[in-house]
Image: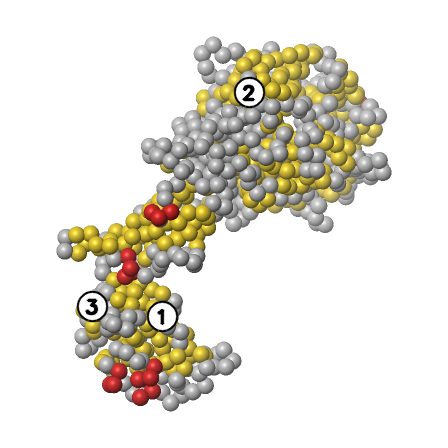
Amino acid sequence: MYRCGSGFLLTLAITFVVAFTGCLGKSTNNPGNGGVTSVTLSPGGTISIEAGSTQVFSATGKNANGRAVLGIDIQYLVVSGNPNAPAPISIASTGNACAGTWDPTATMCSPGSSGIALVSAVVNGVSSPQTTIYVHQHIDSLQVSPLNPQGPPQYECFSQGQIWNYQAIAYSQIGGQSVDITTTVGPMNWFSKNTGVVTTSTTVSGLLPNQVQVTAKTPGITELFANVSGVTSNYYPFTTCLVQAIWLQIGGQNEAGNLITVNNGNTVPVTAVAVDTLCGTANNTPLTSLPLTWSTSDPEVIAFTSSTASTASNNATARNNSGGALITASCAPPTCNIGLPGLTPSGAIAPSLPIYASNYNAAAPPPTKCQPPNLTKGYDAISVDVIPSPTAKPVTYTAWAATTSCADAIGCSSAIFSVTPGTSPIGKILDLPRTPNSMMFNHVAAARVYIGSDQGLMYIDASGTSPSATLVSNSSTCNIALCGTVLTISNDGKMAVVSDPPTSSSPGQVYIYTGGATTAPVDLILSNTNETATAAAFSPDQLKLFILTNLGNMYVYSTVDALSSVSTFAPGTDVEFSADGSFAYVAGAPATAGAPANAVSAYSTCSLPGEASVNIGTAATSATPSKLFPSPVIPLPFIQDGFVWTTQTILALEPPNVEFLTAEFAQNPILYPIVAGNPLQFTCNPPLILSGGFTKGASYNLGQGNFTPIYSQLVNDGAQLIVVAQNIPAVLLFNVGIGTTTSVPLANNAYPLSASASTDGSQVFVAACDQYPNNDPTQPCAVGSVHIVNTVSQGDYQQVPYVNVSDNNNRNMCNNGGNPVPQCLPNLIALRPD
C-alpha cells in the first residue's frame, strides 16, 4: 500500500526518523528479511528530474558477509530537503517515485512544485544512504559561460596548468518569459569533447553546484559542455595553448652540439624544450608535461623504447647495427595539439597541426621573440653515430632469400631459406604457399619479414623455433588478402604498405596492414584506372604517408586527415623525409609552369585547407634520380635573416652518376598569441627553404657507364653509398667524402639479381646468377647462389647455393620446377636487422 501524510500518521519508529513532512512506501512484508547489516539504494547520490516525471528506485540488503539477503521487506522513505516546504515527490511501495502526486492507483503522476527531496530505503531497521532529488521546471536551455566575477580572459588560450571557472545557467519558459531556474536543478555534470585537453573539478571550495573549475592540461582545442536532467548545454570553446616550438638538446650536454657518437647498446638521452603560443607574453616557462612523438630516421640503428613520453625527455637506444641516424621529436596529433583537424571559425575543416623541432639560438630569436629562461641553443635533430665498442664481437648477420620463379603456377610452392656466414650457411628452409614478389623486414621487430605476392600478403616471424609462413588472409580476394608489392614499413614497425596494381585490382589500390586480426587493414583506392603506387614513405613520426604513382600523383594519407592528392610529377620515383621530418624530398618534376624537367622538390608534411602538401622549394637535377639518400649527419645550424637554418646533404642516384644536393631549411613558428576577440586560425606554417638554399652541387660518375640499379643504400654514418646493379658483376662502393668509387667483384663473374646490406655497410648479401647458358644473360639462369661480400676486406668470401635439406643434388627452390632445368633460383633477399 501507499501512504502519504504528516508525521503523526507514521509508526512511532518512523516518526523519530521523519521529524517533518514526508512520505513512506513499503514493500510486501516478508518474515525472511533478517540478517541485513547494510542497505544500498539505487540510484544513489544526486539526481535531477523535471516536475511531473517519474523515477524508479530499488534497494538491496546485504548481510555481514557482503551477500545479498533475499525476500527482504523494503520501506522507501522520502522527506523534504527544505524544512519549510513539503517534499516535492511521492513514492509508491514499489519504489516508483513521482515528481509531484500519484493518483490512487500510483499510475498517473501529476506535476508538483520545485524543491528538494531526500529518499532512503529501510530494511529491518537498517537505512540506506540518502539519495538527493532536485525537482525543477522544464529546462528549455542550458548556457555555459565564463564565471563573470573572475573577469574575461586576456587571451583565447590558457597555458598548461592555468585554471578558469565556468558556470551553466538553466532557463525555463514560464509565463512567456525566460526564467533562471539554475538553483532548482541541482549539481551539473561537466564534460569536454576532446579528452585530455583539460581536467574539470566541481569539488573546489567556493564553487556552486552549477560551476566548474577547468585546468588546462594538454595542448589542444576542445569544447566544454554541461549536462543535467537529460539536457545538454551549448558547447563552449576552450584551448590549452598549442605547442609553438620545440628545441632539442643532448641530455647532459645542454647546448654543446647536435652530434654524438655512442657504442652499441648505449643510450642517448634527449631533452626537449617546448613552449606554447603564450611564450614571451604571459608565460615563458617551458612545458613540463608534453606528449611528444619521438622519432628516428633509421630504427635499425637507434630507436626509442617508447615513441611517446609524458615528460619532455626520452632515451634512444643504439642497436647492434652500427651506422648513422637522426633522432628528433614533434608535437603530432592526435596526442598533441589535440582537436585538429577541426572546424575553423569560418566553418571550414582545418587540417592537423604538427609542430616539428627547430633550431634555437638566443642571438637570433624567432619572430615570436620567445626566449625561455636559461636557454641558449637548441636543435631540430640530433645526429647519432653508432659504433661498435672496442671489445664487441663482429655482428654475424642473417639474410633470408626467396624465389619469384614459381610465377603463381598451380601447385608450385616457392622456397625461402636463411643464410648465415659459415661452413654450413643454409639455415631454415620453408615453403611459401604463394609466389613472392617482394620482401622486407620490420625495422623494429627484426624477427618479422613481410612478403608480398600477387595472391596476398604473407609474413614470417623468423626468430621462432619453428617458423612458418603466415597468410594475412586465406581469401583469394585481393582487397582482403592484400595482394601486391611491399613498398615500405613505418619506422615504429606497426604499418606495412602494399601496392596492388590495376592488373589484379581495378583501379589500383594501396593497403596499409597494421599487423593484427583485430584491426582491419586500410584500403586506399587510387583515382585513375591505370594508376599504380610505385614508391612510398612514412614521415618519421608516422603522422603522414606519402605515396607516389606512375601517373605523376602524390597521395597523402593520414589517420587524422582525409586522404588527398597533389598532382606533382612526371612521374615521381622516390620520396624521403628531411632531418626534422617537417617535409619530404620527392624525386620528380613538379607540375608547375617553368619547372625543370628533372628535379627534387620539397613538400611539407603539414597541409593547408584544401591542399594536401605545400611545395616549399625545388632543386634542378642533371637527371631524374632513381633514389634519394638524405644524410644522417647535419652540421651545426647557422643564422641568417633572423632564422636559424639547418643544412642537409642529399645524395641523388642518377645513373651513371651520383649527384649532391644541398637543402637549407628552417621552421616558421606560429605567430601567436592572438588577443581574445580575434578568431584563432589553426593552420600549418610550412617550413622555409632559404632563398637559393636548395641547389645541386658536384656530380660523380661511378665509372660503370649507364646502369640499372637493383639495390642502393647509404651506410655507415653516411660516408659510403653501396650500389648493386644489373649486369655488373660487382658491389660498387662510393666514398661520399672524396667522391671516388671502388668495386668488389662477385665470384664466378656472377650477375646480381637482388641485394641487401648491413647498416654499417660491412656486409652485403647478393642473390646472383652464377651461370647463364653460353654466358647469355637473356637466357634463363642455370646456376645461382647468395654471395656474401665483406666490403672491409674487399672480398666475396662465400657463395651459398640453395640445397634442399633432403636432397643435396636438388638446387631447385620450386617443388614442381623440375631438376636440373628449369631452375627456380634465389632472386629476392632481405637482411635481418640485428
| Mark seen at residue 112 | 3
Q: How far apart are labels 2 and 1 at the CA level?
A: 65 Å
Q: How far apart are labels 3 and 1 at the CA level?
A: 19 Å
Q: Position of residue 746 (x, y in %)?
A: 78, 23
Pointer 2 residue: 642
Position of 73 relative to 782 (above/below): below
Outermost residue, left direction? Answer: 175
The answer to whether residue 363 is left or right of residue 37 is right
Task: Out of 33 and 204, give the one closest to the viewer.
Answer: 204
Camera-nearest label, 2 or 3: 2
Camera-nearest label, 2 or 1: 2
Q: Amino acid at mark 3?
A: Gly
Position of 493 relative to 260 (above/below): below
The answer to whether residue 832 is left or right of residue 181 is right
**Between disc 3 and disc 1, whose residue precedes?**
3
**In this rendering, does residue 472 appear at all?**
no
SS class of the residue under badge 3? loop
Q: Quadrant of residue 804?
A: top right
| Mark seen at residue 131 | 1
SS class of the residue under badge 1? strand
**Badge 1: residue crowd in 10 Å (few <14, some 14–19, many ≥20):** many
The answer to whether residue 274 is left or right of residue 405 is left
Task: Out of 425 and 283, give the one closest to the viewer.
Answer: 283
**Between disc 2 and disc 3, whose residue precedes?**
3
Name the quadrant of the N terminus. Answer: bottom left
Q: How far apart are labels 2 and 3 at the CA level?
A: 71 Å
Q: Amino acid at mark 2?
A: Gly
Residue visible at 28% across and 57% down in the picture: 182
